[in-house]
Image: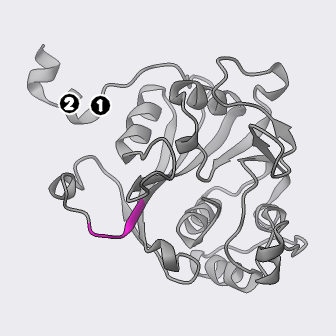
Amino acid sequence: MGFIRANAIPILREHRLRPFSGRCLTLGQADMYFDKPALDRMAHAAGVALGPAPATLSHRADFAQKGYISREAFFLSLGFSEVVSLDKSRFEGAEIEFDLNSPSLPPELQGAFDCVVDHGTLEHVFHLPNCLANIGGMLKPSGRMIHSSPSHNYFDHGFYMFSPTLFADFYAVNEWTIHSIQVYQIRPERQEIEAPFFADYEPGIFATQSAGGMDGKAYGTVCVVQKAVTSTVHKIPDQSYYSKMPQWRAS
């Protein structure tokens, strides 16, 4: 999916609250769908002072023609000392080649990063439990995971679309600190120029729209969580919608 206003703004807000540093890993090449002036406007609105970083252009010729910035220009300006990408193959120039479907994580990737950013990769990986375990395993204790995933009206974009309850329930049962879960609404054909709408997620907030009540726009979920020394990646959650029912707890 790359980075548009809808998933860049939550990252800027997270940086304002808990400044980033260290090594950042993006799952995929991380295309930016905005130029440096647009980044500066978003940072100003989020109350963030960007650090010095070269305003390099995208590796994609068509994006560079539009003046869109590179992943380095974005993430280094947030305070990271290094940003690298991981992919199943090197067809887009990823520095690390690894299949997130794999049942085991190479030793050199274990606890190697201070932040892992999934900007639209999770839905393309078939073995979801292995993927979540691998990306969690790549983080250092106190490292942060940022997901940006499709939730509605992304038909055939990937194998899956994710309800925000997946992130809320999985990370809660595995004892991660959940900093924020937001649902955004966009019109994909205008995602590069139109402001997104955000709603903070809490269980049940979309109950009246959950069965056919959404409109024709696209929805996604942005989740920011932090790993603790006690955090795990293999516990299977019960969906909170059911586990909170008195009859469920009594059974």
Left or right: where does residue 131 sit relative to residue 70? Answer: left
Give percent across and percent down for residue 226. 58, 40
Q: 189 or 6: which is nearer to us? A: 189
Q: Is residue 1 left or right of residue 197?
A: right
- Residue range in magenta is 215-219
> Is residue 25 placed above or below 250 in the rendered structure?
below
Residue at image coords 48%, 26%: 174
Residue 223 highlighted magenta (yes or no): no
Q: Please tell me which residue lies in front, 8 or 216.
A: 216
Say which of 43 and 84 sits in front: 84
Kindly identify which numbered label has been placed on residue 242.
2
Mark on residue 16?
A: none
| Label 2: element kind | helix
Cα separation between marks 1 and 2: 6 Å
Q: Name above or below for residue 237 compared with residue 115.
A: above
Mark 2, other Cα within 10 Å: few <14 / some 14–19 / many ≥20: few
Which residue lies under the disc numbered 1? Answer: 239
> Residue 17, how many percent across, how many down?
59, 60
Q: Amino acid at mark 2?
A: Tyr
- Tags 1 and 2 in contact by the CB under 8 Å rule? yes
Asked whether, in this view, residue 79 is left or right of residue 2, the answer is right
Q: Position of residue 145 (x, y in %)?
A: 61, 43
